[in-house]
């Protein structure tokens, strides 16, 4: 039988980026971080975390590649344009 001895608590703030362009998102988050530090007492730490997701430059889909022996390593799943570009780059090497 297990017993929980310690719990971890956190507060997550998700910014509203509707009015913020892509180039200023990090700066906007840093400003929110500074505001929180300035106005809230008793904080352990405040930090900005960014998760980057790769997408296809042609169709915008999440970047995935085949992991099967029938395809070369790194061959894209999403669209023909990405596959054609991959093939062209392979031919250029």
Image (cartoon, rainbow, N blue to C red):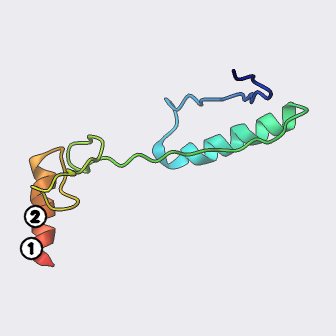
SS at circle 2:
helix
Foreground pick, 37 / 91:
91
Expressed as whole percent of the image width and height from the top left, the position of residue 35 reads: 78, 36
User: For residue 39, what is the image quadrant?
Assistant: top right
Expressed as whole percent of the image width and height from the top left, the position of residue 11 reads: 71, 27
Expressed as whole percent of the image width and height from the top left, the position of residue 62 reads: 30, 42
User: For residue 79, what is the image quadrant?
Assistant: top left
Separation of marks 1 and 2 at Cα, in angstroms:
6 Å
Going by the picture, which residue comes out furthest to the front? 1
Residue at image point 18% right, 44% down: 78
The disc placed on residue 91 is 1
Residue at image point 21% right, 43% down: 59
Foreground pick, 55 / 21:
55
Going by the picture, which residue comes out furthest to the bottom? 93
Foreground pick, 76 / 68:
68
**Relative to residue 55, is residue 74 drawn left or right?**
left
* Figure quadrant of the N terminus: top right
Expressed as whole percent of the image width and height from the top left, the position of residue 47 reads: 71, 44
* Figure quadrant of the C terminus: bottom left
Disc 2 target residue = 87
């Amino acid at each position: 039988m297990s017993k929980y001895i310690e719990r971890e608590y956190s507060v997550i703030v998700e910014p509203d980026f509707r009015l913020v362009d892509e180039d200023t998102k990090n700066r906007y988050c840093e400003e929110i971080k500074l505001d929180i530090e300035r106005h809230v007492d008793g904080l352990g730490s405040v930090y900005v975390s960014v998760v980057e997701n790769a997408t296809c430059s042609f169709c915008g889909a999440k970047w995935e590649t085949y992991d099967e022996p029938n395809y070369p390593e790194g061959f894209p799943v999403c669209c023909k344009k990405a596959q054609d570009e991959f093939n062209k780059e392979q031919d250029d090497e």
